[in-house]
Amino acid sequence: MRALDAVAVRQWADACVRSLDVNREDIDRINVFPVPDGDTGTNLLQTMRSALDALLRTPVDTVGAALGALARGALAGARGNSGVILSQVLRGLAEAAQGAPTASGAALRRALLRADELATAAVSKPVAGTVLSVLHAAAEAARDCASDDLDDVVTAAAKAGGEALADTPRQLAVLAKAGVVDAGGRGLVVLLDTLAAVITGRAAEPAPVTATVPRDSLTTAREAGSAEYEYEVMYLLDGPADREPDVERLKADLRAVGDCVSVVGDGAGLWTVHVHCNDIGAAVEAGIRAGRPHRITVARFADQIAAQAPRFVRDRAIVALVDGEGAAELFRSEGAVVFEPGDAVTAADLLAVVVGTRARHVTVLPGDPSLREPLDDAVTQAIAAGQDVVVVPTFSPVQALAALAVHSPSRRAGDDVVAMAEAAAATRRGEVAVSEREAITWVGRCRPGDLLGMVDGEVVLIEPAASGVGDLACRLVDRMLASGGELVTVLWGQAAPDGIERVLEDHLRVAHPEVELAAYQGGQRDALLVVGVE
């Protein structure tokens, strides 16, 4: 490849995500500095995924624009100190290539040197033997390369990065004691090797993980202070509307409460803040004084360390999020782990359920579309902690039941998820509920107390309460069966009238004798009946 273009940047970003995914566990395992929290590989992977997602959502036609999209996505989704440094590496590449349609070997040389500058500036106390040493060696090798050919420059940089990685235990005592190389440096070498592979077309050689260094060669002690702090606090920061945030004051405020401080920006008004501390409130308050903090995340190092121990006691689990004691018992009887959402469900609640399964692969069946936002956050955090979590789109407990009915542990996890998703999608969902307020619907005006018949979330029938739940339920089932069906599943709620299942059974026996009925006491609070047709 003679020049790096936008297409090649996409190829590189995609290859980086795949390579980091393959190497994540190895990188996490050797993460012993500055705190042995075992998450560097995971943080790099999540940050690079965020970068790739941003690039795929952004129309780009130049290498500068493509690298800029990567940098913005990495900054917005940076995880941990290693993620912050990665965002600055990408920002350096983007700044050096800004406005250029392609990048030559000379441009890549400038880009690596700029990345070295920004990444070093992002760390409050740079230490030899870390990712910064690896990046510096790669940038210097690119600078000193006699050729301006793109493949020669990237090969020189990747080779020097690998050599510097192998040398990190000679610079940092804690690495030699553990017999490993620096985890962040290992991740950077993965990215450099991947870039070299994209440009040259040659497969990358695996970078070293373990180290064999004589003890008398150690020259640098472990960074002081970090082990005293229990929490990692990160957030994005928007500056005041009329000026840039006072970054130096913010850094000083953060250093007063902790260490591993970094405050870095994307050059367009967005900043990522990172600190290790014990006083979480003080770290956030410092951000409030500087601007508007958002997407605040807090991780306790002790929890992260514990998470790295072998914690998976089974291969798979199904988590069902359903309302109602009867429905919960029904799902439990089918082997699912059940969580009954309350009125205010948080991502932490859902994360505790997913992680608590102690399963390597978790399939989640949500029975309520309103849980989407906290569930997305919980799933993201569980994946970052090493679990494989997939959410099957189910918008009603009857769709979740249909999905669970086809679950087979003997299938491959991916095939099983596909089968469950197909079963849920093939189930039409209906509901009988009582209107809480006056509103305009597709079929007319409803008033408080009216009975509503809904199909796939839309009101299709309205009757006054005096008409009776049974009559409306029968009409709703007829409507749902108009396009075919073999099985009707009904969950009746807390406020459903007695004998409603017999009313439906008698109606189906006459009107649809070919259809089977499965009725269960669901106990849900917000619907009289939940109906599914398969």
Image (cartoon, helix red, strand yellow):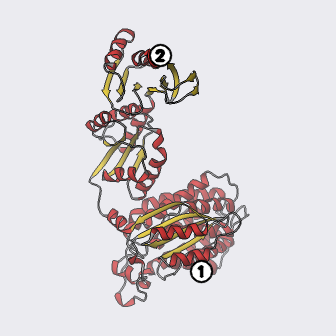
Residue lying farthest to the top in this orientation: 510
In the displayed structure image, the side of residue 241 where residue 128 appears, left or right? left
Q: Position of residue 213 (x, y in %)?
A: 37, 83
**Mark 2 — residue?**
482
**Camera-side residue: 270 or 497?**
497
On screen, residue 13 above or below 157: above
Q: Residue at x 57, y 60 (%)?
A: 76
Residue at 54% x, 76% y: name it: 253
- Residue that mark 1 sits on: 140
Q: Position of residue 37 (x, y in %)?
A: 38, 69
CA–CA distance between discs 2 and 1? 72 Å
Q: Local crowd at mark 2 within 10 Å, few (<14), some, or many (≥20)?
A: few
Secondary structure under tag 2 reads loop
Residue 189 visible in the current orientation: no
Residue 92 pos. (x, y %): 63, 70
Front residue of 14/172: it is 172
Residue located at (26% from left, 54% from top): 313
Between circles 2 and 1, the one closer to the viewer is: 2
Which quadrant of the figure has residue 228? bottom left
Left or right: where 270 falls relative to 28: right
Which corner quadrant holds the N terminus? bottom right
Query: Label 2 is placed on what type of residue?
Result: Ala
Residue 252 placement (x, y as % from top left): 55, 78
Q: Residue furthest bottom?
A: 216
Q: 101 or 424: nearer the eye?
A: 424
